Structures are given as C-alpha cells and as structure tokens.
Image (spheres, rainbow, N blue to C red):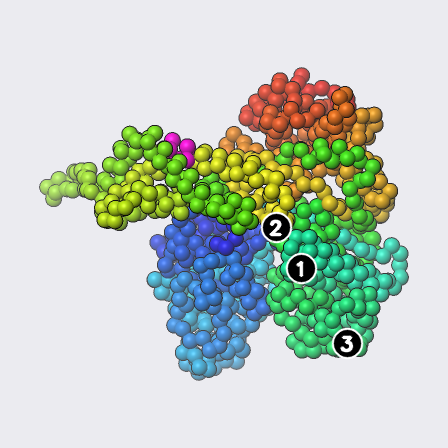
C-alpha cells in the first residue's frame, strides 16, 4: 500500500480479510455461499481499506501473514460509471501493486469466456440492463415479449458472450472464486430502490435463469442495515450464510482528522426572500476561504494551494432564471472568478442555460481534479458515493422539508482536503452550509441529523455544528508566561496497534534524510542495527546455536499399518532442510528485524565470502536469531530507543518544519509500542458558536466566560456544551484570585489538544482528552497548570478515563499543580485527586477488577470538591 493505514483502517482491514478468508474456504471446500459487510462513516476511507484487502487477496501480505489466493477475481458493482471510474482511480492511487491493467472497466465489446483472476472488474446498473450492449442476447426472464430461442442464440455485437454468460462461466469454473463488492450497499434492493437496480442486484445475489448466485457478496457502505435486510430477503432458500460485520467506530474517524471538525449552518432569522443575501454570503465565504488557503500555502511552502469549491444544490424543478441570478450574485461578490469556473452535474449531460449564463456539464469524478471549477451546480445525483474534499461551501435551494437531501449532500463534503487537520485553524477544518429556504425549526432537525442524535445508524461523534460563528484568536488579556507554560505541557501520541520499532526507525531515518536534518541517517540506522544484532548474537550465542539446529532440521511423521491389524503405527523422522526451507525461514526473520536491516546484516555476516554455502549458513543464523524471544525483545527495545534518541535530538528542528512534515513525524512517532510525549502546539484560531438551540429548537445566546486562551474581540469564549454542574466547576475555578486563564480542551487528537493515551492491562489502546486545563499564579510567582476533568461516573468510559488520568499522573504529575477527576454523586460534587498515591492505587485496583467508577467516588478516597 502507498498509504499507511490509520489504526481503525488497519483493524477494519484485518476484520474483513479474516472474514474473506473464511468465505473463500467455505466456498472452495464446501460450495457454501456467504455475505460479509464493511460499515464505515463517510470520510473513513472505505476505498483505501478495500484496496488493502484486495491487494492482499491478490498478492498476499507477509506483514499480517495473509496468503494470496490465485483463484480470486473481484467484481465491483455500483450505481453509475462515474462512481466506478472514481473508485478505480482511488484504488490505483492507494495501492502500489494494483495497476490500471488490473482494474478493468467493463465496456462493450467485452468478449471473455470468464473473468480473469487477480483483476477487479467494474460494472454498474446501466451495463446490466436489458438494453445494454453487454447483455443483448441474454434471456431476461421477466420480459414476456422476448423470443427466447432467438435471443438465447444471439450474442451482443462484436462479442462471443454476454456479460451474464461471462459471470456464469466464472462462477462455474472450479479454478476461479468470484467476490462481488456491492458499493454503497445500503441502497440494497428493497422497494425504495429504483426497480432496474433492485432487480439486477437481486439477480446477482440470488441467481436467475442460467446464471448461478455469486459465491461471495461483500457490501460496503456507511449504513449497512438495508444491505443486511436485502441479503436476508435474497436468502429465501437459506443457501447463503451471513458472516459477522466489520464496523468502524465514527469516533475514531472523527479523531483521525480525515474529516472536517465543524459544520457552520447559516439560516435566515426571519421570514422572507433572502436568497440573494445568502448566496452573496456563500460567495464571500468562498472568496475568504480561497485567500486563507493561499495564505496557508505560502506559509507552508505549498506550490498548489487548495482551491475551495462552492456547491449549489437545486430543487427538483429549479427556475433557470433564479439560478442565473444566483450565479450573477456569486460573480458580483467574487469577480476574480473566471467565467468557466461554473459547471453542473445535472442529469442532462450537455450545456444548460441559466438566465444569462451557459453552464457546461462535467463528470462528477473529474470535479476534484479540475481546480478551475469553483462553483458546481447539482441536485442529488452526487449525494451518494461522490466525494470532493475541496468542497467547503454549500448553498441549498431545497425547501425545509428536504432535510434528508441536504444532509446526504452535506455528508459528501466532510473530507479534509489535505487528509489531515490544519493545525490550529478551525476555519480550514470546516464546511459552511447555507440554507435560504430553511427556518430555525428545520435547522434544529438538520443539526440533530448531522450530530447523529436522531440517526440510529450513526452512534454520534459527528462534526460540531455551529449556528453563529465568530472568530476566536489568542486572548490578548492572557499573560505571556501562561503561553510559555502551555508550550511545556506534556501530551502523548496514540501508539499504533501495528507498531514495529524497526519500521519506526527506518521511517524516521528516511524522513530525517529527506529534510536534511541528518544526512546519511538511513546508512547510520543500518549500521546501528547491524551493531545491535552483532552484540545480541554474542549475548545469546548458546540459544542461537540450538535454534540453528532447528532451522536445519525438517521434522516429519510417518503413519503405517498392515492388513493383518487395525492398529496404526506413528513414527517421527528428521531430514535436513533444503535451501528453499532455509530461505523461507530467513524471509520470516525479515519480519522480525526489518527487510533492509536484515539484508544488511546478512551482507555483514557473509563478508568477502561469495560461495552459496556461506550465504545459506548466514541465512540460517539470522533465522535462528529471530526464534530467540529475548533477543527479539532486546532488538525491539534498542531500535525504539535509537528512534527516541533521534526524536529528542532533533525535536527543536522538527517544530520549525511545515505542518505537513510535522504531521509526518507525528505519524512516525506514533509507531512506538508505548505512548510517547510530544510537543503541544499553540491554537491559532478557533470557531466559537455564540448561539444555541433550546429543547424546542429555538435559538438563544450562548453563555460566555472570560480568561479563555482563545477569545473573540471582546475577550469572551462561548461555553455551549457544558451541563449545569460542569458550569459550576468552571465558575468556581474562575472565581479564584490566582486563576490567570483556562482552556477548554478539544475532544480530539490534534496538535492543540492535550491528549492522554495509554495501554490497558490487556494491551488494548485507549485515549482521552481531559475537559479543562487551568493556569494559576503559584506562591513563587511561576505559572502552574492543573487538569480538571468533570465526567459523569455513570458513563461507560468513566473508569477507563480514570485509569488514563492515573497513569498520566504517575508519569507527569510533578509538572502539574493538580490533576483531578470530578463527578456529581447524588447532587454532591465529588473529586478524586490523582496526584494522591492512595487514590492512584484505588483507581488501578478498580480498573483491573472491572469495578464501576461510582464505587470510587463513593469511597473514602474521594473528597467533596472544593477549588484548591
């Protein structure tokens, strides 16, 4: 893969690959048909995960120990050619082993008796319709007017087979295994699905006429319930077995930074015709976003800045003159736009006239890669499966009753264009949705849709929704030494589940060389690992010699019997391994020590000897070393220690690099087996929401407080997501005369968020972001920080967060005045002082025994909360 998978992506990849192996075995050994699904929210990178699965299916994956299946062939089915083309491009971009020859767009004439293994074939609904050139001649059993005998003998023009015959032959071939990927599988084939698509999908899944059912169906979607229901409906004869689903947690996607953090909703405050006013606002936002991206590109040395896109969503029957007036308004506000900057993706694939404007059509999949297109006119054709990360503004002329249409299209605009957060700049991590035809009641429903509060398919963790955005900048009233204290706060990376210290060292060496921070770092890392392996070979010489004998010995068992007796005799035997067996053992050692490092050590062992026996002996020795567990543990520890040393040595230089390179180093840092301390970045700007909706959906001013690190021009920060007792805690801390400033810590992994990550007793990964950081003037005049984390004891993650704070306080407590966890127990605010050793012991015991957080707050180790 060209991309390093995020943790959640790798976990999903492993889940799907395991289930796919199970499905392949069931089909190849017993003819059992199966279905499986991957459910992931928009922006999670479903195509990247699919690329990893398909690549390992065709070529194997030695790292995660998956073997290739030489019989596998993939049929990718979606609703439209444009979605297929977009998917084909993404698969090729993501994989370094799938090339365009392996990714076949099925177009007439297509004359193959079977599909070929090791290839992905793309089909869509139109291509399997009764009038398609690919299917002419196929017996369509629901058409009573067909002359069956004639059509059965007639092949499509220039083709020897219909596509249905090709699919049937592929399924029937014992040397082939067909895996069908049903893209956007939530559309299923139920009664709300367009008839032709529903019929075609059902035929593929259930079989029809002379075409048997597809052996393995893999559904990919953001919401998989309809796919499950469709598969159940299609499984009337119980011949297909449903395997467990692979599900991606939306919270992990939001935390990854791949999707935008904020959605700004702009809606009229009163009844009237505000189309022109709000379209002008959309154009102004587009212009401002363009300037912001250009400024960011200059500061980061990026040659091609992001060119943001405005999407104009039309109703079903738009007035062309009205649309033309909106286009004119956009150009009046943003005259720097070229007249060719407007395109449409409407059903008519031709030039459309809107008032005085002639607007050309563009293929949806080309919009992202055509930066000259700055305004895109659409209805709902791009609401499913289409993504354009540079789309940052949407103005929708849909009426208020069309909340779902608005939400679906908005869901296509949430990807971050750089595939990461822009550190400290929330406006560049946001999308603005302007709704001239909505009222505040309808807006409240959209808010609930976006945040998942009324969507059972999405458990929450969507972007923040802002109704009255204001710029928040570093608060000029905050003393300078508070910011100096901030710069020294500890924050921790999240270790990746697949971390391998030698990979971390190699990637770090490559990065340091690329950035000219340590020329020759790769050669230096190679020399260091050779030295490490040499030293370990001396220390574990006795164990290695014993393992060398194992490498050279091939163990076997013979089974015998006679016709005179029913008794079976077993006998063990040993044969000397051949070169192929030793080479296989050596290849396994490369996984333990790293391919390049192992090859370098092999050359070191061989030295000037050039005969094959010397090479084979060296391979056997390295293979034996990889089979000594203490040696491997020491190798991992020392390579990780070398990486840590280089991070410490070049830490100051790393902070001077551009954001993209700093993000690359943070990904490398996270390849550790344990959480690592890293540099906390200063927030640069923030979007504050100064309006909230009450329970009836009515708008009211947000409560505000002073002394926050980020504030508007009046020095105020809105506190819109705190409950009553959390507000009481905040006010109590602010009332202290020693309090200089405070910070509402963002609940996400970001450079300006204090993160606490750790491994639990079972090795599982956790992370948390405490709610508040307060800064006080100490007795000696120095600024001292405190972590105060109000969190309901009844919540499912309460004990987990306490354990995180315990470990953090154990390691970094000396750098804080207080580290406290709070809850409200039967109306009384209770606190656990995590700097107290007795409290830490109690928290650890409760966590390991699986006790509830409430028991801790009710015990003697807790105290009544009083701001200290």
Residue sitting at 75 percent across and 58 percent down?
291
Residue sitting at 54 percent across and 31 percent down?
760
In front of the other: label 3 or label 2?
A: 2
Callout 1: SS: loop
Q: Which of disc 3 and disc 1 is earlier in sequence?
A: 1
Q: Which of disc 2 and disc 3 is earlier in sequence?
A: 3
For label 3, the residue is 357
Q: Position of residue 233 (x, y in %)?
A: 53, 58
Mark 1: few, some, or many residues within 10 Å (few <14, many ≥20)? some
Q: Which residue is farthest left?
A: 564
Quarter residue 379 falls in: bottom right
Q: Where is residue 856 in the image (x, y as percent from the top left)?
A: 65, 22
State the CA–CA distance, disc 3 to disc 2.
40 Å
Quarter residue 606 falls in: top left
State the CA–CA distance, disc 1 to disc 3.
28 Å
32 left or right of 744 in image: left
For label 1, the residue is 305
> Can residue 655 be seen in the rendering of this structure?
yes
Residues at circles 2 and 1 in contact by the CB criterion of under 8 Å: no
Callout 3: SS: strand
Q: Which mark is residue 660?
A: 2
Q: In this view, does 747 lie above or below 208?
A: above
Residue sitting at 67 percent across and 59 percent down?
306
* Closer to us: 204 or 729: 729
* Closer to us: 446 or 655: 655
Residue segment shown in magenta = 630-635
Q: Which of disc 1 and disc 2 is earlier in sequence?
A: 1
Residue sitting at 36 percent across and 65 percent down?
173
Callout 2: SS: helix
729 left or right of 547 in image: right
Q: Is residue 144 above or below residue 285?
A: below
């Amino acid at each position: 893969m060209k991309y390093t998978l995020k943790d959640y992506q790798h976990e999903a990849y492993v889940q799907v690959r395991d289930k796919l192996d199970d499905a392949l075995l069931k089909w190849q050994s017993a003819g059992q048909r199966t279905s499986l699904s991957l459910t992931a929210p928009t922006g999670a990178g479903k195509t990247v995960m699919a690329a990893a699965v398909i690549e390992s299916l065709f070529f194997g994956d030695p790292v995660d120990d998956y073997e290739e299946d030489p019989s596998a062939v993939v049929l990718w089915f979606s609703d439209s050619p444009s979605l297929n083309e977009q998917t084909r491009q993404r698969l090729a971009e993501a994989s370094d082993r799938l090339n365009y020859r392996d990714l076949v767009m099925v177009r007439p004439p297509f004359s193959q008796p079977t599909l070929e293994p090791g290839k992905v074939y793309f089909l869509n609904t139109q291509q399997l319709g009764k009038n398609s050139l690919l299917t002419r001649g196929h017996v369509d059993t629901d058409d009573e007017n067909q002359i069956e005998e004639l059509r059965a003998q007639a092949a499509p023009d220039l083709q020897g087979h219909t596509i249905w015959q090709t699919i049937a032959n592929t399924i029937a071939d014992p040397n082939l295994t067909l895996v069908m990927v049903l893209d956007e599988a939530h559309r299923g084939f139920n009664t709300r699905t367009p008839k032709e698509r529903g019929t075609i999908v059902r035929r593929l899944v259930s079989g029809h006429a002379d075409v048997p059912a597809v052996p393995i169906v893999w559904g990919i979607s953001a919401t998989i319930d309809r796919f499950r229901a469709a598969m159940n409906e299609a499984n009337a004869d119980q011949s297909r077995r449903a395997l467990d689903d692979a599900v991606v947690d939306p919270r992990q996607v939001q935390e990854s930074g791949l999707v935008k953090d904020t959605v700004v909703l702009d809606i009229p405050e009163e009844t009237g015709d505000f189309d022109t006013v709000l379209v002008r606002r959309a154009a102004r936002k587009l212009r401002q976003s363009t300037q912001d991206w250009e400024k960011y590109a200059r500061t980061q040395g990026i040659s091609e800045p992001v060119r943001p896109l405005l999407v104009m969503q039309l109703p079903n029957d738009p007035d062309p003159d009205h649309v033309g007036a909106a286009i004119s308004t956009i150009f009046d506000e943003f005259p720097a736009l070229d007249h060719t900057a407007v395109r449409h993706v409407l059903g008519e694939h031709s030039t459309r006239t809107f008032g005085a404007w002639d607007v050309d059509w563009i293929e949806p999949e080309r919009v992202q890669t055509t930066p000259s297109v700055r305004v895109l006119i659409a209805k709902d054709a791009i609401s499913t499966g289409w993504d354009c990360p540079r789309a940052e503004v949407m103005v929708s002329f849909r009426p208020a009753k069309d909340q779902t249409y608005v939400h679906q299209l908005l869901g296509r605009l949430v990807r971050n264009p750089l595939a990461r957060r822009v550190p400290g700049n929330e406006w560049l991590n946001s999308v603005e949705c302007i709704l001239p035809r909505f009222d505040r009641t309808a807006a409240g429903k959209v808010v609930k849709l976006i945040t998942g509060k009324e969507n059972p398919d999405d458990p929450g963790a969507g972007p923040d929704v802002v109704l009255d955005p204001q710029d928040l900048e570093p608060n000029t009233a905050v003393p300078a030494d508070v910011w100096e204290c901030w710069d020294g706060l500890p924050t921790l990376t999240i270790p990746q589940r697949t971390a391998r210290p030698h990979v971390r060292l190699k990637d770090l060496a490559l990065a340091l060389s690329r950035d000219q921070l340590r020329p020759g770092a790769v050669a230096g890392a190679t020399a260091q690992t050779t030295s490490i392996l040499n030293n370990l070979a001396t220390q574990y010489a006795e164990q290695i010699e014993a393992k060398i004998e194992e490498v050279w010995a091939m163990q076997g068992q013979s089974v015998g019997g006679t016709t005179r007796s029913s008794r079976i005799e077993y006998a063990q035997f040993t044969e000397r391994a051949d070169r192929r067996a030793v080479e296989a053992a050596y290849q396994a050692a490369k996984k333990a020590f790293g391919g390049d490092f192992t090859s370098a050590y092999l050359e070191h062992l061989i030295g000037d000897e050039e005969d094959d026996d010397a090479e084979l002996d060296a391979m056997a020795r390295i293979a034996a070393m990889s089979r000594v567990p203490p040696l491997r543990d020491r190798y991992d520890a020392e390579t990780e220690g070398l990486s840590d040393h280089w991070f410490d040595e070049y830490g100051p230089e790393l902070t001077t690099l551009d954001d993209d390179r700093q993000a690359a180093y943070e990904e490398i840092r996270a390849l550790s087996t344990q959480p690592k301390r890293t540099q906390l970045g200063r927030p640069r700007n923030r979007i504050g929401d100064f309006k909230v909706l009450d329970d009836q959906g009515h708008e009211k001013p947000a409560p505000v407080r002073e002394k926050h690190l980020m504030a508007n021009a009046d020095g105020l920060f809105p506190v819109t997501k705190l409950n009553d007792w959390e507000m009481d805690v905040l006010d109590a801390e602010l009332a202290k005369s020693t309090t200089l400033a405070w910070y509402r810590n963002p609940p996400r992994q970001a450079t300006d968020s204090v993160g606490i990550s750790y491994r639990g007793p079972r090795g599982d990964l956790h992370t948390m972001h405490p709610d508040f950081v307060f800064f006080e003037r100490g007795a000696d005049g120095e600024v001292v920080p405190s972590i105060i984390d109000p969190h309901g004891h009844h919540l499912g993650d309460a004990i987990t967060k306490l354990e995180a704070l315990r470990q953090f306080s154990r390691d970094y407590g000396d750098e804080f005045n207080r580290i406290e966890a709070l809850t409200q127990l039967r109306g009384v605010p209770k606190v656990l002082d995590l700097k107290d050793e007795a409290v830490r012991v109690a928290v650890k015991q409760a966590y390991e025994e699986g006790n509830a957080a409430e028991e801790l707050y009710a015990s003697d180790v807790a105290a009544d909360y009083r701001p200290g």
